[in-house]
Amino acid sequence: MASPPPSQASSARLSQSPVTLFKQAVGERRAIGGKVARLARGLASYARSAEADEKLIRLKALGVIDVIPTHVQLMVGGADMLRFWISPAAADYYEARGISYSFHQVLRFLDEPSSLIDPIGLFSTEDGIIGHLMQVVHADPVYDLQLLTMFDGGHANLVRQLREMIAGTHPRSGSIAAIVEEPDYHRRLLSFVQAWTRDPATPSLLRSNVAERRELSALARTFGSLTTSMRYFARLPRAPTEAARHLFYTRAFPAHLGER
């Protein structure tokens, strides 16, 4: 299902001054140590490729994905997903809403630095994925909901934290409010998560620009879910030299490798 038109009420992200948003995103001084520690753990996880392999095996055993790409394919696929899907779709959305894409990334980093270092999500913690879902209006939240399947109780934890955000009792309420673009996003996301956990065939909660623009909807068919993203990754070159050639010479999304 497409995301309904944004609420007429203005979010803090659109109504507060940049200085106020900056301070809110940083949060309380006592929270900074935790942010730095999570960033360090996230960076350190890249040296533990076996951990990602275990998560992929679990996801395949659970039926979330049906193919496991190689490490080279994951690297190239992550780059393609970022340059062909995540960044263009986000920039299009922020431009339409009059939001500086660059400043938005600064606020995201200040709120949770670890949320920006893992575009694929396999090295992210449970709370990292949940925080990322709550931090920005997602083009399609299904990818991250499927990632949460890696953790026992992940979806229940997301529901709990969304309810806390709505009630204003979440420990990161202030910093997340400085970033999230639509004031009713958490209520809509909570409703979708509850419906999706009952029936994963529930039509996705697409962000407005993805639902409205045909070229973005086409990309969402490939990158909107973990299932289809891994299929795309597995169609990419396996050999490092061919992978490097793909990264260097491929300047537009190779539709023949995507989902029909």
Image (cartoon, rainbow, N blue to C red):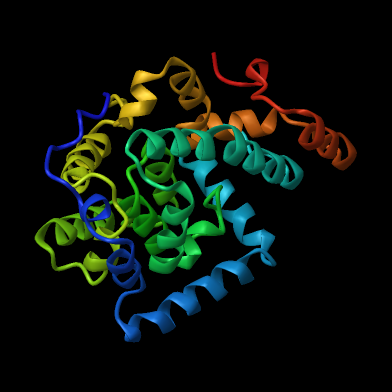
Q: Which one is nearer the viewer's eye here, 140 or 85? A: 85
Question: Residue at image x 46%, y 23%?
Answer: 216
In the picture, the quarter occupied by the N terminus is top left
Residue located at (46% from left, 41% from top):
62
In the image, 190 versus 150, the foreground residue is 190
Q: Where is residue 226 in the image (x, y as percent from the top left)?
A: 49, 37
**Can the viewer see residue 7 in this picture?**
yes
Dividing the picture into quarters, in which one does residue 46 lie? bottom right
Q: How many labels were placed on the picture?
A: 0
Q: Is residue 138 left or right of residue 192?
A: right
Q: In the image as oriented, which residue stretches furthest toward the bottom?
A: 30
Give the left or right position of residue 159, taking residue 102 as reference. left
Q: In this view, does 188 lie above or below 108?
A: above
- Please state if 208 lies on the left or on the right of 128 as rendered: left
Q: Where is residue 197 in the image (x, y as percent from the top left)?
A: 26, 39
Taking depth in this image into account, of 138 and 61 the one nearest to the observer is 138
Q: Which residue is drawn at 52% across and 71% down?
A: 39
The quadrant holding residue 7 is top left
Up the image or down, 35 lies above or below 236; here it is below
In the picture, the quarter occupied by the C terminus is: top right
Query: Can residue 139 be seen at all in this image of the molecule?
Result: no
Q: Position of residue 140 (x, y in %)?
A: 38, 35
Q: Residue at x 55, y 67 (%)?
A: 42
Foreground residue among 63 and 139: 139
Q: Where is residue 141 in the image (x, y as percent from the top left)?
A: 36, 39
